[in-house]
Amino acid sequence: MNNYEAVIGLEVHTHLKTSSKAFCSCSTEFASPPNTNICPVCTGQPGVLPVLNGRAVELIARSAFALGCRINKKSIFARKHYFYPDLPKNFQISQYELPVAEDGFLEIKSDEKAPPKKIRIKRIHLEEDTGKLLHAVGSRELDHTLVDYNRAGIPLMEIVTEPDIASPEEAWLYLNALKSVLEYCEVSDCNMEEGKFRCDANVSIRPVGQTALGVKTELKNMNTTKGVRDALGYEIKRQTEVLSSGGLIFQETRLWDTAAQETRLMRAKEEANDYRYFPEPDLPPLELSEEFLTMVAKQVAELPSAKRGRFVSEYGLSDYDAGILTAQKTLADYFEAAARALADKKPETYKLLANWVINELLGRFNARDVIPKGGNFSQYDDLIQSASLAEIVNLISSNAISGKAAKIVFEEIAGGSRGKTVADIVKEKNLVQITDEGAIKKYCQDAITENPVAVGEYRSGKERALGALVGAAMKKSSGRANPSAVNAILKDLLK
């Protein structure tokens, strides 16, 4: 890549959080039995007429406000024609020449020290999703294809960027930032496993310094943000090798093969005129009133960047910790619920709580990009309630229990002891921290008597030898002595 640079644009399709489809009243519920959420409208039966879902328009407008777009008060629906088994009407109702919104942006930051980079958003429009083709049942490959039309007609928001993305890492950052914004706005669940947040990528390369764009390739079949990053990395390398060896890049659509970790040809890329767009005759132009837009603008809640700044100023957290805690609205809500239950409202206590949320809570999920289902923090609360985690932090900050004992309590609750309270576990396991100075002094004196080598090393100037004596004293107290008191008393006795 030394002689070439990448140019990337992304097209994100996300299911809007509506209870009914874009142009009919069929349910959008996920995982319903095949072909049960269908009707003559979404299956394209003759003589039916579509009726626009007003809630879908509201959510599109909300997203547009959050992404700084210009909202067109008048937009037009179009028919996008192509022939494929998952499209029962043989056309898709979409928008082409005049979408709901245009000219927005989203900022990403790859380095805390670097200024944010603005990724321009070209357009946001509403369309309907297609059905789903099934080529296998479980692990069994079929010699035929099944079609489930439950997904056909679900309202889909497409967000298209300008070709402002310069690397797979920037694409990954943009997608995570976009998911976060849409989650905060409560316009979509953004669940990639359920196909509710999907991305196609257009990528080309060109010689460094050249302004003209190269021939682009469209990438599909990427079902995670990491998959998008990996597919782009592979494709950039492939195109570089082709051009470096004197070959040509052809405009085409390629699939990302997760198992093989490579892209492969799907079909020659279509141009817009291949879809034979024309205005949808059964839907009038969409006109948005000033009153409607004012109402929607008020729905846009605190966005991730603003919340991140507030976490720094209000709770005294670092930019790093605030970034992790606010990346998902679900996690930010959980943290704030726990913060409200803290007895001590000091920055050091908030920092302690943040450490427990980031290291212990998220550690149990084994990832920092887990998005609980349901649009709230219930999945985190199911592991350990925010009030219980706050109670643990309260006990640590008041020196009632040690950090080690706190982890025992956390593991008990997270491991399934849902019927027990924090207080029950502390009492049952005798975890209350020993703060009595006389008792701690006795542990320290015994540790000094039984460890003469460590005593000699410490008195000869080896500060690290104190750690062995602290460990010995803590062991005698079964880990319940206050570590700070143990340190102080040992130093006093060793003078």
Image (tube, helix red, strand yellow):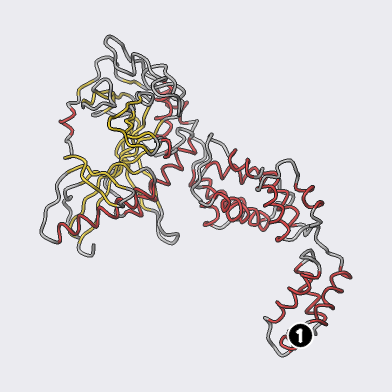
Residue 127 in view here: no
| Residue sticking out furthest to the bottom | 460
> Which image quarter is the N terminus in?
bottom left
Q: Are there few (<14), some (14-19), or many (20+) residues within 10 Å of tag 1?
A: some
Residue depicted at x 69% and y 47%: 413
- Residue 250, above or below 125: below
Residue 378 shown left or right of residue 480 in the figure: left
Tell me the residue that label 1 is attached to. 455
Label 1 SS: helix
Image quarter where the C terminus lies is bottom right
* Of the pair 227 and 338, the residue shown nearer to us: 227
| Residue 115, horizontal then vertical, whole percent | 40, 57
Q: Residue 28 location, x and y as percent?
A: 43, 24
Can the viewer see residue 152? yes
- Furthest residue toward top: 47
Q: Residue at x 40, y 31 (%)?
A: 15
Q: Position of residue 316 (x, y in %)?
A: 61, 55
Q: Please, is residue 432 above or below residue 93 in the view?
A: below
- 330 relative to 2 in the view: left or right: right
| Residue at the limit of the structure toward the right, as seen here | 438
Give the answer, above or below, for where 264 lies relative to 490.
above
**Who is closer to the viewer here, 69 or 380?**
380
Q: Amino acid at mark 1?
A: Val
Decide which of 174, 305 is in the foreground and name it.
174
Across and down, in percent, residue 295 comes to: 47, 26
